Image (spheres, helix red, strand yellow):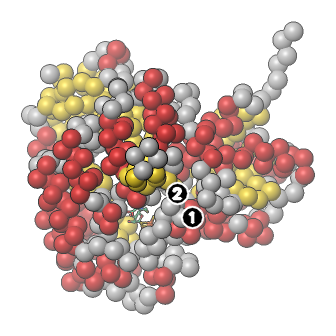
């Protein structure tokens, strides 16, 4: 007998970083795993609306209630629709969300998302607000592999959750809890499984991946981030290893040395410095000086002379003077940063920096951001220009949207290259000679 069960449809909206993107794919994995639910891309057609929020910058709460207002209209038309709010705003605000939006059914945190099937069931049954935002659980990672959802050849793998650093501007330690490292056996077995389904590139995820530390029980010593890198490098077929984000404070010599012995580590590193002024770094409580940062980069460049370094910058931190900003510009030239992310400082409630006097006018901050971004764009273009005529190893990701003749893939330094080739190359590494560049984005190449 063919029983046709209509599966409930789920719509997931994600804000924020790669951690959140990855969390959303875990949510999708958990809910579709036993064929109980299907994912829809149309919110109006869904039975359960899930919002995975981010609170790192700007009026996160306002943005949330704006979005919920739109979803309320969907619920008004179909009262059975469930609305679930997760992520960092949910962890931070908890029940306060419900107080302002009584139509919300479920509030869950970054570390309770694996409980969603139960929370949903409970909500259907009890018809009252269901809330679970506890931290310090790594159980969600038992659900992180999904061959249907993970791209076949590049995959995120979270190795550490939370953050203990308490940089004075940052909300993350309050929303994602303290650092908890995932067991290395679980991580390695997940990567081995990914390699079996064709994954060739691994992107290790964590707020501070280089704070990773567990126990090596057999050798009775600590098992650190560099140990994990060596173990991953022994897994056949994993030919590229990336990670985000690492912190300069714990970027120890053993990690730098790993660049000598592990060719799979990309010639590209995202190492956020935030500012080029020691005074500001101190106020930010970053735990390193500009000189410490330069030292790390020089040591790395002595092993990998062509490594490209990218960073995050915060502009207009309380107390940042014209001179401090000039020092940041000088550091950008000196390190010769590649593509970087930059943000105007955003006051986050409850953080230490929120108590500092901030008297730089917003127009001045915007002007500084403009100058900094222009400089980074110019440097980034120079990096691209230097690639012209070189041969690059590219992991082929697929066909471009509008053209089934053109394939595209990514270089080690994260540049997208278009080239002509056949479908057998998708998911493989190819050697491409770069033949063309433009100022803003693309590079073109041909098979060497
Ligand atoms: N763990 C990472 C950063 C996570 S947050 C690290 O140590 O670098 C990502 C980036 O957001 C940060 O690097 C910082 O540049 C930016 N950011 C965090 N809080 C911010 C705030 N209050 N205002 C502006 N930018 C912020
Ligand atoms: Fe935030 Fe600093 Fe941790 S930027 S995530 S508190 S390292």
Residue 426 visible in the shown view: yes
Q: Nearer the viewer, mark 1 or mark 2?
A: 2
Whether the residue carrying mark 1 lies under 8 Å from ligand 2 is answered with no
**Disc number at residue 180?**
2
The CB of the residue at mark 2 lies under 8 Å from ligand 2: no
Tell me: 359 left or right of 390.
Answer: right
Q: Where residue 177 is drawn, which disc sits there?
A: 1
- Marks 1 and 2, how far apart at CA: 9 Å
Residue 442 occupies quadrant: top left
Mark 1–mark 2 CB contact (< 8 Å): yes
The picture places residue 66, in percent across and down from the top left corner, at 65, 62
Q: Residue at x 81, y 63 (%)?
A: 102
Q: Secondary structure at mark 2?
A: strand
The quarter of the image that holds ligand 1 is bottom left
Residue 370 placement, left or right of 47: left
Residue 408 lies, in percent from the top left, at 31, 29
Of 203 and 424, nearer the camera is 203
What residue do we see at 25% from left, 75% from top? 289
The residue lying at 32 percent from left, 41 percent from top is 230
Q: Toward the viewer: 63 or 164?
A: 164
């Amino acid at each position: 007998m063919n029983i046709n069960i209509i599966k409930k449809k789920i719509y997931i909206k994600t804000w924020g970083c790669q951690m959140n993107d990855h969390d959303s794919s875990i949510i999708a994995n958990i809910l579709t795993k036993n064929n109980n639910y299907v994912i829809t891309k149309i919110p109006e057609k869904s039975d359960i609306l899930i919002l995975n929020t981010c609170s790192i910058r700007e009026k996160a709460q306002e943005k949330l209630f704006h979005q919920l207002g739109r979803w309320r209209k969907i619920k008004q038309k179909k009262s059975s629709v469930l609305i679930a709010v997760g992520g960092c705003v949910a962890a931070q605000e908890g029940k306060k969300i419900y107080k302002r939006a009584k139509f919300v059914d479920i509030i869950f945190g970054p570390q309770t998302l694996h409980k969603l099937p139960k929370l949903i069931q409970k909500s259907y049954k009890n018809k009252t607000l269901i809330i679970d935002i506890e931290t310090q659980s790594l159980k969600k990672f038992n659900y992180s592999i999904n061959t249907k959802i993970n791209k076949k050849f590049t995959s995120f793998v979270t190795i550490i959750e939370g953050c203990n650093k308490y940089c004075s501007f940052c909300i993350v330690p309050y929303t994602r809890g303290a650092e908890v490292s995932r067991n290395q056996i679980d991580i390695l077995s997940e990567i081995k499984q990914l390699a079996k389904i064709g994954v060739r590139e691994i992107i290790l995820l964590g707020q501070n991946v280089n704070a990773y530390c567990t126990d090596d029980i057999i050798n009775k010593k600590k098992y650190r981030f560099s140990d994990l890198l060596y173990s991953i490098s022994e897994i056949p077929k994993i030919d590229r290893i990336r990670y985000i984000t690492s912190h300069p404070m714990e970027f120890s010599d053993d990690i730098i040395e790993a660049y000598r012995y592990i060719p799979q580590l990309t010639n590209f590193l995202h190492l956020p410095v935030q500012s080029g002024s020691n005074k500001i770094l101190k106020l930010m409580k970053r735990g390193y000086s500009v000189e410490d940062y330069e030292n790390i980069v020089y040591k790395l460049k002595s092993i990998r002379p062509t490594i490209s370094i990218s960073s995050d910058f915060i502009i207009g931190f309380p107390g940042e003077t014209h001179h401090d900003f000039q020092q940041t510009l000088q550091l950008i030239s000196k390190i010769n940063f590649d593509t970087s992310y930059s943000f105007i400082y955003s006051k986050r409630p409850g953080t230490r920096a929120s108590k500092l006097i901030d008297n730089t006018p917003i127009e001045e901050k915007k002007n500084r951001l403009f100058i900094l971004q222009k400089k980074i764009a110019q440097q980034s273009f120079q990096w691209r220009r230097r690639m012209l005529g070189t041969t690059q190893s590219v992991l082929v990701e697929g066909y471009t949207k509008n053209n089934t003749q053109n394939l595209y893939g990514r270089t080690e330094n994260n540049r997208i290259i278009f080239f002509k080739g056949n479908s057998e190359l998708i998911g493989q590494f190819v050697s491409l000679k770069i033949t063309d560049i433009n100022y803003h984005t693309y590079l073109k190449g041909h098979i060497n």
